[in-house]
Image (tube, helix red, strand yellow):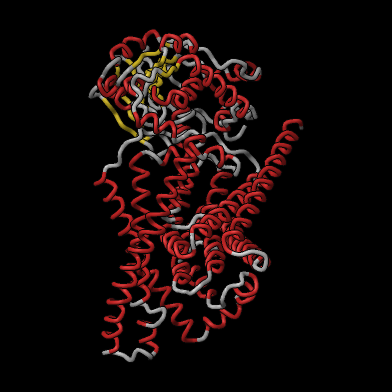
Amino acid sequence: MSGCHDANTMEDLPPCSKKIVLAGNPNAGKSVVFNFLTGMYVDVSNYPGTTLDISSGRLGGDVVIDTPGVYGISSFNDEERIARDIILTADIVINVVNAVYLERDLFLTQQIIDTGVPVIVALNMIDEVEKQGLRIDVQKLEEIMGVIVIPTVAVLKKGLVELKNAIPSAHSGNITPNLPCKLKEISMATGSQAEALLIIEGDQAVACRNCLQTESFREEVYLLRRKHVNEIINQTVFETGKGSTFSTTLGRMMIKPLTGIPILAVILWVLYEVIGIVIAGNVVGFTEGTVMQGIYEPAVRMAVGYVVPLDSWLGIILTGEFGVLTMTFSYVLGLLLPLVAGFYLFLSLFEDSGYLPRIATLVDRLLVGIGLNGRAIIPMILGFGCVTMASITTRLLSTEREKRIAIFLLGLVIPCSAQLAVIAAIIGSIGISYAALYGLVIFCVLVIVGTLLNILLPGNPTDLLIDLPPLRLPRIGNVLHKTFTKSYAFTKEAVPLFAVGALIISVFQLTGILLFLQKMMAPLTVGCLNLPRETATAFIMGIVRRDFGVAGLNGMHLSPVDGLVSIITITLFVPCIASILVIFKERGKKEATIMWGGTWVIAFTVGGIVAQVFSAAKNISHGKIMVALVFIGMSIITIIFSTVFHRLKAVKCLRRVES
């Protein structure tokens, strides 16, 4: 068969020597074990066909090779492909396992055992297990898995001598029960249980080099292996409560829905109070009102007035309603910077405390319903900082299907920090009931659009595999440094873009193009959204930069309902130019064009529905009663929609299985 080839090998081994391979998840401690075994005699080289470095060294007459940290051996990425090819040619595998995350790490352990290669498990960081109030029955673990298990604390060199002495006794373990019968048949054809296993898991590269077709048992094998690992955990890991600390207990509470959701709700409420009320009200009132509009802008107009008349074209462009020197700096420094800095402060606190991955774990089940897993919450949270960078980080997701869903939802429902900051300021002026309704509408769009994508796109979401670092108090210096760095980067990027946007809008205003565009968009802004005609300017500004557009709304005198409809529509409106360019780069012209056009349709459709509902019901009830009715209605619609489409998804999957 064309395209068949042999596996890459690291090097030619001396006669009678063995290849000892270190394998494990990221941050399990492999490097420390590798350095202990090899000492000073280490060689670092590029793996053939890649730019990835692989370390190798000597242990007596044997060769020790350190593989990249992976969660599984397959061909999903270069790291997994390299780990796979090295492990398949190993004589002995030392699997370094993080004992704190045994449930996660043993999935890779069991996959390696299933290949039939002799394995020794280094149960690393065993001291951290005791600190977290847990106990691992090592003897029972050895009995169930059928391999040698050595408890270690690699950084203190505890257990490493025992690990080294156990290497000659390494042997194969107990494979996952009830693996498909096809495994034996393919093992006879390939002469290798390891390669047969990967072929039934759908590894095309391994199938190709054996001149065979891949099999479609991956999901079945993964479910069997996960079930087996869960049974191992249930029989070997126990809570003692002796070493459990407050941070450990709190960390566990944060990932359980019953306690984690209320904790997240309280944190979001604090976030709203600080950014939406204190900073948006008091701080921005001083920086924008007192400093920029009260001192800076009059001074600039006076200085420019000495050079050119303020009512001339140049004077209007520099200091008019959309002045390059006035509006640009008032918006960026007076309005946006305090709000953005406040948001980045909270984001840095979440990152430094270890709370971000716990949010990912908490929302995993929710995101599965829209075709993602909990890992997708990371680019989404980063999107609240910058949607452009978040779109790039969708590369960390496992499949093209998940990347496609995530990048579209990012561009649709996630406001960047600057946009969110101004939205928080507008919400602060229209009341918390409208703020709750805004959040509900955006959440409904997320659920409905995500569910539709999950139904329409082929495939299923992958399982969540993520590190949960210890929960700790944030380091103030580190938090302040991150906040300053990100706020400075925002200012450096925003000032020139706002200046260009202000120049374009000023020229449009002077030439009459702005009025023409307002009239052209009137059927949407006035007819559909029931907004004043001048709000079209904000949408035009939003194409240049989203926060530029929403900042334009902040200066308008809008009723609470108009404010709500405006911020809903502009949140769902097209991403800024930088984000659009990244989407085109990541997803290609065809997909990106569909996504871009889709945001226009969804934004004005949803905004129009909200506006028309309020318009139709304004004679029936007012104020909080109306908000409550719309809130309840949207909740019911979303629940019904989600339930119906998930059942359709289940029926679709059942029919596929039956066929």
Is 442 or 516 nearer to us in this picture?
442
Residue 108 image position (x, y, % from top left): 47, 25
Please provide percent x and percent y for residue 603: 59, 62
Q: Is residue 287 left or right of residue 120?
A: left
Residue 223 is at least partly visible in this image: yes
What is the x, y in percent for residue 204? Answer: 58, 32
Residue 229's place in the image compared with 519, above or below, is above
Residue 597 in view of the camera: no
- Horizontal side, residue 111 vs residue 1: left or right: left
Q: Residue 29 sits in which quadrant?
A: top left
620 relative to 193, above or below: below
Examine the image and state in which quarter residue 620 appears.
bottom right
Can you say whether 81 is above or below 271 in the image? above
| Residue 329 vertical position relative to residue 67 in the rendered view, above or below | below
Q: Residue at x 45, y 56 (%)?
A: 388
- Rendered location of residue 508, percent (x, y): 48, 81
Q: Say which residue appears at 45% left-offset and 82% top-offset.
A: 507
Say which quadrant the N terminus sits in. top right
Image quadrant holding the C terminus, namely top right
Tell me which residue sits at (47%, 69%) in the image. 549
